[in-house]
Image (tube, coloured by chain):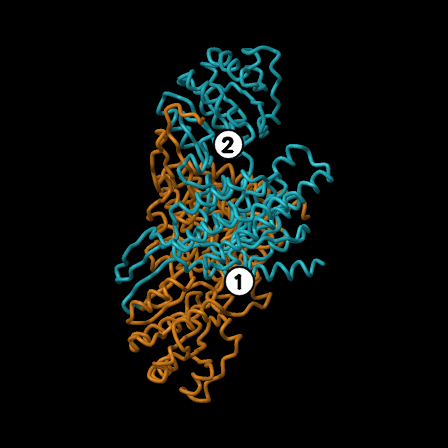
Chain colours: A orange, B cyan
């Protein structure tokens, strides 16, 4: 059984590598045309996809999945049109492949160009909604990468039907259908086989919970781009505009609490804590936010605020809960963030440019902000058009990942007979 | 025993992380001063280092190491001065940390800067000469990264003495001594422990043979930068300047055959094979190069040329041996390179710009050259000043790795109270 899985995956890998070689040579126009054909094919396959989705929904109900999980799984005609339009949006983006990143001449006359090229073959392992299938495939095709998709078993029928439609569209536009392949083996051995296939897969991107990412990370022989937790902070400095600070923390916490760039901890300078916290707590309460405070916060807000433990500083609630700590100065705020944070997104609110500068320089997170909500750590908000995710890696891609981060470069050197002496 | 190794490594990792936080905040001047102090400390420790090296040499002789291996291990006063000067050269280079890579403003007024920062903690696992200890430490310190070094057991005493001197110099200049740490545990479990420490190590760079790289790659939970084989090609097109082609292949093969950017295979267009090969074979023979030819090469050069098998196309000789194949056209040359090559370095020799263009575009190697020797795939030749190695990765760093490739970026976002709606 496992031998068969390895054999099947090897075939998939081989075909992906072949397709990626062709993809690396096609024009931007050909890729755009293929993406538009893929979007059309999705819409033409609505009945087949909904039928397959029905099978997944039935299995989910038999397996006793909760209503939220079932809803995430559910497709309908409208959701499929949204998926198709999202593929069209990606088709419209600027293609980074072929760009000259830098160019210089050496004293011996060699002309060197650093040129953006596709990475090759990307493995995508996910456990999320079926729309990830089309989004991930479109992002990779746009950047000339072949993709091997491996979704969760709960959405297997939907994913197979979506991938079939996308491959048809891709083939109709004259690009290799193996530009995208879906692994239909739901056995977990398939994840292991993919993770070991560094001959064929150049990069793996797992999208899902911490345990999926950890599993892939331990098994993978190739680089993994991780999208770990965001334990994000808002620090309200002594020189903050307090009304602005309140708007920012309410937005960072409550505008969409279930995402990685939502704030989890509020740090407040002691000099303005008594002036700031009561009104801020009221504004947060109005949004349904529950507070967990340190001792000094509770002295100001009252004993009915739940005490925060050290665990709270390390927790990504992804919920309407906020931990609050009063700190003696900006250095203590930075120290707290470096010790308990996840180097994801952190904001300072202050009118003092020197304090801001210190914070922006010393906080080592993928995105650090001054007087703005943590929620802006986002590919769309950065103007990238599309987003693969928010990487917590410290090599290759950090923070919001757009199309550029799905590329690498090669060097092209033009000479006139130079040799080394 | 293994538990103790994990415990010790954990301590080393913790200290490296602490040091890296301080290092990320120091100025370029402080790092330069520390590097100069480290170079001085190396020279002041000549007696201690030579004494330690004597112990390694004695052990090597007892273990029956060959004379070439013993020579690689041997240090003397002159070699130590070369090492110190190499550290001074790195001190002189431009520091990439703090550079603004890109800067833009969003319609909502947010100002986004993408700024170069250190990666964090780099693990360096090597089995080469003791000078790697000081080179790797200097490159990492220059870029604000803490480094954990793990050299081979045959050089352990030398490496410990070198690291001690470097740490002293670093401390004297006011930077944390734990900016560089050497793992003195020669047990292989130490490599495994390092490879699993993704809490503390952000990137691992193994330098050594294929089996070391493979071991680290299978064990590592963090990204690995690989420096695999170079199976490099020179393709002599039908429109080549034949005298230039001869100079280039002789240089690419024979100038320094034991390195990864030396050529291993010569591909010749059939239209000029009869005109080119005899004189070229003579020039190569004059350098002591042995040929392995395909059938058509042997028809031209004679039956005393050893026949090439498919294995030859896949072999990195690292020696004065060259495989030769006659191909019907440029497409066949590209196909051969993509099938048998290692995507490292490949050259086309031609006077036809269209043929050159096709080759440069379609050959998917870290460096592709037109009318120049493969030997130019090199950090020094690219003008990078120093070289970490030549990466065969397809993420983060590809081809010659300089200081920039030891950095990553963070985004700094300046606002005026923006929130998301």
Residue A262, position as x, y percentages in the image: 41, 68
Residue A365, image quadrant: bottom left
Gap in angstroms between the C-alphas marked 1 and 2: 42 Å
Q: Is residue B124 left or right of residue B105?
A: right
Find residue A209 and name its label: 1
Examine the rendered structure and indicate whether residue B122 appears above or below residue A290: above
Residue at disc 1, secondary structure:
loop
**Number of marks drawn:** 2
Which residue is label 2 attached to? B261
* Parent chain of label 2: B
The residue sitting at 62% across, 27% down in the picture is B311
The residue sitting at 54% across, 59% down in the picture is B200
Residue at disc 2, secondary structure:
loop
> Depth check: A180 or B394 in front?
B394
**Residue B98 visible somewhere in the drawing:** yes
Residue B226, image quadrant: top right
> Depth check: A79 or B177 in front?
B177
Q: Is residue A157 left or right of residue B62?
A: left
**Residue A182 visible somewhere in the drawing:** no
Examine the rendered structure and indicate whether residue B2 appears above or below residue B240: below
Q: Is residue B140 left or right of residue A64?
A: left
Find residue A367 and name its label: none
> Depth check: B353 or A362 in front?
A362
Residue A342, position as x, y percentages in the image: 48, 65
Residue A31, position as x, y percentages in the image: 38, 41
The residue sitting at 40% across, 73% down in the picture is A253
Examine the rendered structure and indicate whether residue A74 appears above or below residue A248: above
> Depth check: B142 or A146 in front?
B142
* Parent chain of label 1: A
- Which quadrant, please, contains the C terminus of chain A? top left
Tell me whether circle 1 and circle 2 mark residues in contact (CB < 8 Å): no
Q: Are the residues under badges 1 and 2 in a single subunit?
A: no
């Amino acid at each position: 059984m496992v031998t068969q899985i390895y054999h099947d995956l090897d075939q998939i890998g081989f075909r992906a590598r072949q397709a990626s070689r062709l993809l690396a040579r096609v024009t931007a126009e050909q890729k755009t045309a293929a993406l538009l054909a893929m979007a059309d094919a999705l819409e033409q396959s609505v009945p087949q996809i909904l039928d397959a989705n029905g099978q997944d929904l039935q299995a989910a109900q038999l397996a006793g999945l909760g209503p939220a999980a079932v809803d995430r799984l559910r497709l309908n005609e409208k959701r499929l049109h949204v998926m198709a339009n999202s593929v069209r949006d990606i088709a419209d983006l600027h293609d980074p492949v072929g760009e000259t990143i830098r160019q210089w001449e050496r004293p011996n006359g060699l002309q060197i160009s650093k040129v953006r090229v596709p990475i090759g073959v990307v493995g995508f392992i996910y456990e999320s909604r079926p729309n990830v299938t089309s989004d991930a495939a479109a992002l990779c095709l746009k950047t000339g990468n072949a993709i091997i998709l491996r979704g969760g078993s709960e959405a297997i029928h939907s994913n197979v039907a979506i991938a079939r439609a996308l491959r048809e569209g891709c083939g109709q536009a004259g690009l290799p259908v193996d530009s995208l392949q879906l692994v239909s083996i739901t056995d977990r051995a398939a994840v292991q086989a993919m993770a070991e296939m560094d001959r064929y897969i150049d990069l793996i991107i797992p999208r899902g919970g911490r345990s999926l990412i950890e599993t892939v990370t331990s098994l993978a022989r190739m680089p993994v781009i991780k999208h770990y937790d965001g334990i994000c902070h808002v620090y309200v400095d002594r020189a903050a505009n307090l009304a602005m600070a309140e708007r920012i923390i309410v937005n960072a916490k409550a505008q969409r609490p279930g995402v990685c760039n939502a704030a989890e901890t509020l740090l407040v300078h002691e000099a303005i804590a008594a002036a700031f916290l009561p009104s801020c707590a009221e504004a947060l309460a109005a949004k349904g936010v529950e507070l967990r405070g340190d001792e000094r916060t509770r002295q100001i807000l009252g004993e009915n605020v739940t005490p925060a433990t050290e665990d709270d500083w390390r927790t990504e609630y992804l919920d309407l809960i906020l931990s609050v700590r009063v700190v003696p100065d900006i250095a203590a705020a930075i120290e707290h963030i470096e010790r308990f944070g996840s180097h994801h997104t952190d904001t300072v609110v202050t009118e003092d440019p020197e304090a801001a500068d210190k914070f922006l320089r010393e906080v080592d997170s993928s995105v650090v902000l001054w007087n703005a909500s943590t929620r802006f750590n986002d590919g769309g908000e950065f103007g990238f058009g599309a987003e693969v995710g928010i990487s917590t890696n410290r090599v290759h891609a950090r923070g919001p990942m757009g199309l550029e981060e799905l590329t690498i470069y090669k060097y092209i050197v033009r000479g006139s007979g130079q040799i080394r002496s």
